[in-house]
C-alpha cells in the first residue's frame, strides 16, 4: 500500500489552497499539488498546520525530494505524535531510502495507533522482508481483506484435510504474482488436492498441462461454482496470495524451477550471445514509481555491446529502434516464454518477466530498486527463490547509473570466462 493523505473530511476546514492541493495529491497529481500545498503551509494556522505539513511531506516523497520529505514528515510527527497517518507515511519514506529497520519501527507505531487493513498490510510486508513470516501472516491476510475474493457457500481453505478434495485458487495481484505464488501449488498437490486455477486468459497457454494444475479456468469467462445437479464443483477456495499464509510457511523462499522444461545448471551457463531485456514495470498502484529504469540509463547498457557480440531482445510490448521486439500487445505468456527460451541471459526489473524467466530456469539478472519489495528480503539478507537469478541493487533511490555500470562490468567478466 502507498502513502496516505489527511482525510478528506478535514479539507473543508482548511484553506482553499490546501483543499485543491490535497485533492490533486490524492488523485496522483503531485507536481500540480506542490504549489498549492506550499501556499497552504504559509496560510496554515494552529492545529491545521500538521495536516498541511504531512501532505506536503507526502508530496515531496512522490516527487523524489527525499530530504524535504524527511523534514516535513518529522515536523508533522512532532506536531501529531499520535497520528497513524504520519507514522505510516514515515514508514513508506524510510522504505524508499532503504532504511528498513526504521521503516519497520514506523509501521509498528502506526499499527499501534490504528489497526485498519491498509496500515496492517504495510506492517505485514515489512515483517515479511525481515523474514518474520509467522508473525506477518495474520496481518497479511487481514490487510488484504478488502481485495480478497470470497464465494458464498464455498469454504475458505485454512489447513483442512485436502485428500481427494478440489480447491479453487483465484488469481490475485499481477502476472508476476501468478508466476511466483504458483510454486505453492506443489504443496497442495502433496496434500492430496486437485488444484483448479482461475487465471487470466493470456496465462493459460503457458500453464496448460502443468503437473501441479488440474484445471485452468479463464478469469475473463468467470467461474461456475455449481454443477447442473446443483452441487458445488469445489470443496474449498483460496485467493492465490493467501497460499503461504494458509500453509503456515515459516521460510517460504527456497530455490525452485517449475515452469517449462529447461534444465537448471547455474555453473554451466554458456557464453552470452543473446540477451533479453525488460526495463519497464507496470506501477499503476503506487504513487511513487520506483521499479522501472529510465530508457536513458538502459541506453548506456545497450551501447556497451557490439553487434558481433550481443544481440539484444526487448521482452516488453514496446517498439524500441534497433532492438528486436518479439513481444507484441496481443502476445500471450507462452509467446513470451518462447522468446525467453531463445535468450542466453535475461536482464529485467522487478516485474513478471523477471519472475517468469527465473521460474523457467533461464539465467536471469534482477535490477532491484532501493525500495526492495518484501519478496527480495534485504541486500544483507536476500531471499533466493531461484538458483539461477542474480541480484543487482540500486544504491541511490533515484538514479540507476551505478546498477548499469555494475551490470556492464558483470557482462564483460561473464563473457571473458
Image: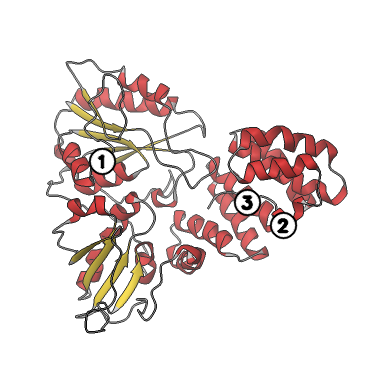
Crowding at label 1, few (<14), some or many (≥20) Cα neighbours within 10 Å? few
* Residue receiving disc 1: 330
Spatial CA distance of label 1 from label 2 is 47 Å
Q: Are marks 2 and 3 in contact (CB under 8 Å)?
A: no
Q: Are marks 3 and 1 in contact (CB under 8 Å)?
A: no
What's the image's color scheme?
secondary structure
In the displayed structure, 123 sits above or below 274; it is below
Q: Visible in this render: residue 98?
A: yes
In the displayed structure, 48 sits above or below 237; it is above
Question: In which quadrant will I find the C terminus?
Answer: top left
Spatial CA distance of label 2 from label 3 is 11 Å
In the displayed structure, 88 sits above or below 236; it is above
**For the point 26% across and 46% down, which residue is it?**
356
Residue 210: quarter of image: bottom left
Crowding at label 2, few (<14), some or many (≥20) Cα neighbours within 10 Å? some
Toward the viewer: 19 or 282? 19
Q: Position of residue 21 (x, y in %)?
A: 70, 40
Q: Visible in this render: residue 74?
A: no
Crowding at label 3, few (<14), some or many (≥20) Cα neighbours within 10 Å? many
Residue 171: quarter of image: bottom left
Under circle 1, the secondary element is: loop
What is the number of the mark on residue 4? Answer: 3
Residue 244: quarter of image: bottom left
**For the point 34% across and 53% down, which residue is it?**
177
**For the point 15% across and 46% down, which residue is it?**
264
Q: Earlier in the sequence, mark 2 or mark 3?
A: 3
**Closer to the camera: disc 1 or disc 2?**
1
* Residue receiving disc 2: 83
Q: Position of residue 39 (x, y in %)?
A: 78, 34
Amino acid at each position: 500500500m502507498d502513502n496516505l493523505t489527511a482525510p478528506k473530511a478535514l479539507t473543508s476546514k482548511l484553506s482553499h489552497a490546501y483543499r485543491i492541493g490535497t485533492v490533486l495529491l490524492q488523485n496522483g497529481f503531485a507536481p500540480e499539488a506542490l504549489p498549492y500545498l506550499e501556499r497552504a503551509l504559509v496560510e496554515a494556522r494552529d492545529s491545521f498546520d500538521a495536516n498541511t505539513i504531512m501532505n506536503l511531506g507526502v508530496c515531496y516523497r512522490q516527487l523524489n525530494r527525499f530530504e524535504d520529505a524527511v523534514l516535513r514528515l518529522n515536523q508533522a510527527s512532532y506536531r501529531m505524535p499520535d497520528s497513524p497517518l504520519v507514522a505510516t507515511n514515515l514508514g513508506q519514506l524510510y522504505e524508499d531510502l532503504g532504511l528498513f529497520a526504521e521503516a519497520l519501527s514506523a509501521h509498528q507505531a502506526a499499527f499501534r495507533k490504528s489497526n485498519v487493513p491498509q496500515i496492517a498490510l504495510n506492517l505485514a510486508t515489512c515483517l515479511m522482508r525481515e523474514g518474520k513470516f509467522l508473525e506477518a501472516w495474520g496481518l497479511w491476510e487481514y490487510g488484504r481483506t478488502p481485495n480478497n475474493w470470497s464465494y458464498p457457500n464455498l469454504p475458505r481453505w485454512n489447513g483442512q484435510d485436502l485428500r481427494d478434495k478440489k480447491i479453487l485458487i483465484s488469481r490475485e495481484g499481477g502476472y508476476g504474482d501468478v508466476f511466483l505464488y504458483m510454486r505453492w501449488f506443489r504443496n497442495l498437490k502433496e496434500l492430496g488436492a486437485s488444484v483448479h486455477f482461475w487465471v487470466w486468459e493470456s496465462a493459460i497457454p503457458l500453464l496448460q498441462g502443468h503437473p501441479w494444475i488440474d484445471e485452468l479456468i479463464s478469469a475473463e469467462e468467470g467461474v461456475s461454482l455449481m454443477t447442473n445437479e446443483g452441487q458445488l464443483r469445489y470443496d474449498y477456495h483460496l485467493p492465490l496470495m493467501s497460499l503461504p499464509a494458509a500453509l503456515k510457511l515459516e521460510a517460504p523462499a527456497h530455490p525452485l524451477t517449475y515452469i517449462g522444461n529447461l534444465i537448471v545448471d547455474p555453473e554451466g551457463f554458456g557464453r552470452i550471445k543473446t540477451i533479453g531485456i525488460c526495463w519497464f514495470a507496470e506501477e499503476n498502484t503506487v504513487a511513487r514509481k520506483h521499479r522501472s529504469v529510465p530508457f536513458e540509463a538502459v541506453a548506456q547498457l545497450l551501447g556497451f555491446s557490439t553487434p558481433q557480440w550481443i544481440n539484444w531482445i526487448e521482452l516488453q510490448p514496446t517498439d524500441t529502434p534497433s532492438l528486436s521486439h518479439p513481444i507484441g500487445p496481443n502476445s500471450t505468456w507462452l509467446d513470451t516464454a518462447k522468446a525467453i527460451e531463445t535468450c542466453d541471459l535475461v536482464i529485467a526489473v522487478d516485474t513478471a518477466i523477471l519472475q517468469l524467466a527465473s521460474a523457467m530456469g533461464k539465467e536471469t539478472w534482477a535490477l532491484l530498486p532501493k525500495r526492495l519489495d518484501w519478496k527480495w528480503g534485504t541486500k544483507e539478507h536476500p531471499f533466493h527463490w531461484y538458483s539461477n537469478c542474480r541480484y543487482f541493487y540500486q544504491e541511490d533511490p533515484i538514479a540507476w547509473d551505478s546498477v548499469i555500470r555494475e551490470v556492464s562490468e558483470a557482462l564483460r567478466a561473464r563473457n571473458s570466462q
